[in-house]
């Protein structure tokens, strides 16, 4: 008897906790919906700027920055994203200083900025359906209790709230998942374009290193000399099977 009483007390406590979470869960569901709408607006703005600049615009900007690092501040304004513009400025500073490590730091900072941007929609992918499920299950308990007392109007209201929370959760999860996939592809293309600056720095650093490489003692040094001209042979010399030259014809002996 005491065990059943304790179980009933625990069940009643959990039911009260779930009922207390009803309003916060619904508020959070509305909040994630607003955040999802904000991220969708940011994505639309970024997509519009990329469409106006054209496909592969960041590659062109990287080439221009490599050719003229002093104009990086002006060129970065045409970058497809804010963290891509910061990466262009850092790459230009590294090129002017002749430090290949600076390019690596710029790429690392870009990857961190991309991860921070993608974390928002990645959280929404999981948080949206979770809040939708919680918003569905919590109103069902008082609705079923009202049905036991014959209050169908309360049940209809609770079911309406539950279905609305499910719809919002699924909508947020679907949109956030689509934004995450599309942004991941775009930012991967941008990272590939920025990595070309690192390849350029490594190539420019390898040329002086190969030219100044010391030669070990006793090792022959290859020198570039013009080829020795070989005079053409007036006539071929025939060789017999034994390896002896054939005597000239009798007409040439008298000469």
Image (cartoon, rainbow, N blue to C red):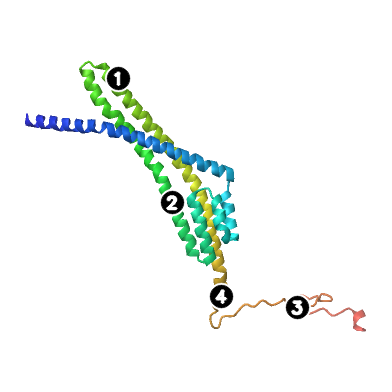
Cα distance in 3D space between marks 3 and 2: 80 Å
Residue bearing mark 4: 212
Q: Where is mark 2, residue-wise?
A: 113
Q: Could you tell me if residue 198 is visible in this image?
A: no
- Residue 249 visible in the current orientation: yes
The residue at the point 52 percent across, 49 percent down is: 189
Q: How many C-alpha atoms fall within 10 Å of the one at disc 2: few (<14), some, or many (≥20)?
A: some
In three-dimensional space, the C-alpha distance between marks 3 and 4, rounded to whole angstroms, equals 51 Å
Residue sitting nearer the eye, 217 or 213 = 213
Residue 8's spot in the image, x, y percent? 13, 29
Query: Could you tell me how far apart the alpha carbons at marks 1 and 3 are, in whole angstroms?
Result: 115 Å
State which tag comes first along the sequence, 2 or 4: 2
- Position of residue 111 in the picture relative to residue 52 (left or right): left
* Foreground disc of the pair 3, 4: 4
- Name the residue that disc number 1 marks: 156
Callout 1–callout 2 Cβ contact below 8 Å: no
Secondary structure at numbered mark 4: loop
Name the image quarter holding the C terminus.
bottom right
Q: Nearer the viewer, mark 2 or mark 4?
A: 2
The percent coordinates of residue 96 (x first, y second) are: 54, 65
Q: Which of marks 3 and 2 is in front?
A: 2
Q: Name the residue under label 3.
A: 243
């Amino acid at each position: 008897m005491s065990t059943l009483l304790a179980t009933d007390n625990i069940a009643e406590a959990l039911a009260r906790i779930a009922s207390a979470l009803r309003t916060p869960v619904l508020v959070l569901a509305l909040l994630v919906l607003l955040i999802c709408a904000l991220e969708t607006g940011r994505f639309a703005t970024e997509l519009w700027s990329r469409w106006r600049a054209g496909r592969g615009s960041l590659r062109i900007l990287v080439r221009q920055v490599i050719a003229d690092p002093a104009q990086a501040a002006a060129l970065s304004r045409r970058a497809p994203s804010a963290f891509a513009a910061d990466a262009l400025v850092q790459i230009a500073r590294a090129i002017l200083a002749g430090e290949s490590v600076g390019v690596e730091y710029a790429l690392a900072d870009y990857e961190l900025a991309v991860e921070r941007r993608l974390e928002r929609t990645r959280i929404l992918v999981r948080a949206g359906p979770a809040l939708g499920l919680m918003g569905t299950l919590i109103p069902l308990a008082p609705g079923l209790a009202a049905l036991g007392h014959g209050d169908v109007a309360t049940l209809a209201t609770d079911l309406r709230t539950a279905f609305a929370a499910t719809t919002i959760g699924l909508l947020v999860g679907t949109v956030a998942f689509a934004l995450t996939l599309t942004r991941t592809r775009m930012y991967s293309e941008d990272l590939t374009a920025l990595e070309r600056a690192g390849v350029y720095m490594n190539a420019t650093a390898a040329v002086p290193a190969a030219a100044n490489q010391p030669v070990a003692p006793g090792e022959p040094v290859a020198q570039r000399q013009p080829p020795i001209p070989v005079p053409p042979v007036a006539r071929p010399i025939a060789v017999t099977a034994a390896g002896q030259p054939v005597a000239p014809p009798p007409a040439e002996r008298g000469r």
